Amino acid sequence: MNDTTCSASPSLLTATPTAEPTSANWMGIVSLALGVFGLVTAEFLPASLLTAMAADLNISVGAAGQAVTATAAVAALAALTIPLLTRNFDRRFVLLGLSLLLVVSNVLAATANSFFVLIIARVLLGIALGGFWSMAAALAMRMVPDNLFARAMSIVLTGVSVATVCAAPLGAYIGGLWGWRSAFIAAGFLSLITLVTQLFVIPAMPPKDNPSLRILGQLLTRTQVRVVLLAVVLMISGHFAGFTYIRPLLEEVAQLSVSAISAVLLGFGIGGFFGNFAGAFIAERSERNAIIFGGALIIAITITLLFAGSSASVTAVSIALWGFAFGAFPIGFQTWIVRAAPDQVEAAGGLIVAAFQVAIASGAIGGGILVDYLGALGGPLLALITTTLGTLLVLSFGPRSQSPA
């Protein structure tokens, strides 16, 4: 997902030395941020529109949640394979192709008249999502001088922060006014703007490497790499088991109106925005503590929702704190994987992308099963179980030495 693009090593895409850019292409960087915003928005729109989508397509809420599963599963595969399959193509054309897939995905989702068409739309989104995250950092590195790379990536990742704050509440609000399809129409318009912008500001970028699966296989032989990937799968799947089915929880348990749901989702996004800063502050001192902090808070929140979720005020505060807790995870996991594989940062980042997407898919599947059989509290229940296991894993095997600033 979004956090993995921070990897700054050019190990996979810069085997052939080339001249460093002498000036920064800031419009190109902004176009990448637009792409991030569009991808993250499209990925998580179903979370705020789930019940309406299910009713319109005549499927269960759990089945509708598999729209998230399809995207995540394909994105995990795409993150590992797109660099290999496109290794002989100009990176500009690859990026434009991925942005075009995002446009097509949103159009198909907005016009879907069956569950099958919706899944096709989400598969296309998964290809675009995984492919983009696998090359975003490398693209940014080729558009700015080395001393400006951190600033460039902070701009790119602004798209994640803004989407985190805006996507869910705006999706719920627009869907409440004009129907769930209108939210995908808006996302499609945004993705079209992104495509046109990138067409004019992204320069030619000839391929620079001949990547293989060998490096990924070597990384998986390292104990700390395997531990961090397992922790990601457990803790992130728990989060998305709850987040994917948050709409049924707010409607059926807390019995909130559409406008109130939009406000709660906005609180979740704002909480996540500030949680990113809190996570970074803690991770600078200990990535292990950043992850444990987020995990412990989500455990407390899910217990609260299971026993007091019928209270609208308790639920609203809990959801905002949930967003804050989840915001602490990305920088913690990213710092951990970099320390576990400092010699292959980008390859390790690709594994994190895949692990995040596998976690999203498994969380959506498991949460959907429990929601269909146990009701809207099934999501928080699964989140409690897997987050507890993941937190215990990090407590037992997480890095204990202080991280470099």
Image: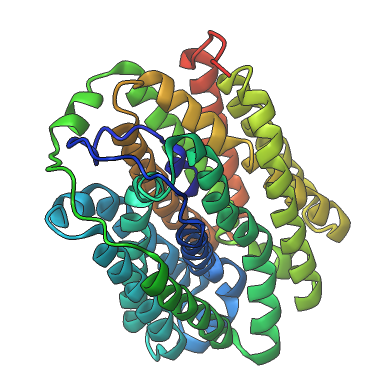
**Residue 403, quarter of the rendered image:** top right
Residue in the picture at 11% in, 55% down: 88
Task: Identify which residue, 352 or 311, lies in the foreground.
Answer: 352
Position of residue 223 relative to residue 88, above or below, is above
Scheme by which the image is coloured: rainbow
Q: Quadrant of residue 132?
A: bottom left
Identity of the residue furthest to the right in this view: 313
| Quadrant of the rendering where the C terminus is positioned | top right
Q: Measuring from the top left, give residue 358's x and y in whole percent.
A: 36, 47
Rendered position, 323 above or below 267: above
Classify residue 223 by image quadrant.
top left
Q: Is residue 330 left or right of residue 215?
A: right
Between 16 and 374, which is closer to the camera in this rendering?
16
Is 132 left or right of 273, judged from the image as shown? left
| Residue 108 seen | yes
Describe residue 376's horizontal placement relative to residue 106 as left or right. Answer: right
Pick out the residue farthest to the front: 22
In-front residue for pair 140/109? 140
Instruction: Kindly identify the residue that appears in the image at 41 percent across and 36 percent down.
Output: 7
- Spot occupied by residue 204 in the image (x, y as percentages of width and height): 27, 61
Locate residue 320, reporting x and y percent: 76, 51
The residue depicted at 29 percent of the width and 59 percent of the height is 74
**Looking at the image, which residue is at 55% across and 34% down?**
331
Q: Is residue 382 visible?
A: no
User: Measured from the top left, where is residue 227 in percent x and y?
Assistant: 38, 23
Position of residue 342 relative to residue 183, above or below, is above
